[in-house]
Image: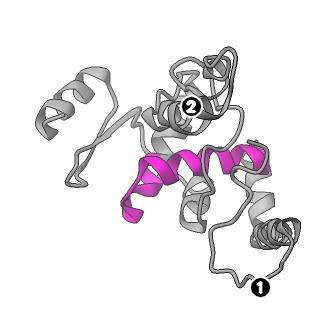
Amino acid sequence: FLLEGYLYPDTYEFYYGMKPQDAIGRFLRNGEAKWSDELREQAAEMGYSVDQILTIASIIEKECGVKSEMRRVSSVLHNRLSSGMKLQCDVTINYVEKFIKPYITGDINRYNEYYNTYKCPALPAGPICNPGMDAIKAALNPLETNDLFFAANAAGVYAYAETFEQHQQNLADLGI
């Protein structure tokens, strides 16, 4: 899981006979180049490390299929973190179930407390995917709202709520 979040999604040219470590190096150098001093400073001003912003951005990337909704989803995540609430994002459960458990032996539940945001108290231990720049910028520039909940249906309709009761109504309205 050490490279998750750091292999920047982009178009790359690879050559026959290229060593795997050279390909990985290309991903990592490109990702590093995308992080300007301005983005790093913005993260620091918010009280987050680059690693933490990448983790938030990875959740946004997986939770939000609509680019125009990313900043508002980011707002929900930041508001929950600020208030001490668990993030409770289903995509973190999917990450554990689909991308960790099938590839480990022994106690297959040992990573739940690190990545399942229904169990871990704040951010997961690291990114759950390799987020693009839209998600990174959304993580750094959340809308200013009081929203603590969001939901989206299969049609890509999003609903936001400040209270659990409003969220329950949104789920019903969305048919979820």
Mark 2 vs mark 1, foreground winner is: 1
- Dot 2 surroundings within 10 Å: few (below 14), some, or many (20 or more)? many
Q: Residue at 45% of width from left, 56% of height from top? A: 70
Q: Is residue 144 visible?
A: no
Q: Is residue 102 above or below residue 145?
A: above
Colouring chosen for the image of the structure: one colour
Rendering coords of residue 65 (x, y %): 38, 57
Q: Is residue 39 left or right of residue 9?
A: right
Residue with the mark numbered 1: 15
Pick whichever of labels 2 and 1 is earlier in the sequence: 1
Distance in Å between CA atoms under marks 2 and 1:
33 Å
Which amino acid, by three-letter code, is at mark 2? Val
Boundaries of the magenta span: 47-73
| Rendered image quadrant of residue 1 | top right
Can residue 21 be seen? Answer: yes
* Position above or below: 134 against 148: below
Image coordinates for residue 33, horizontal then vertical, percent: 81, 73
Q: Residue at x 77, y 85 (%)?
A: 15
**Which mark, by number, is residue 96?**
2
Amino acid on which the number 1 mark rests in the picture: Tyr
Circle 1 residues within 10 Å: few <14, some 14–19, many ≥20? few
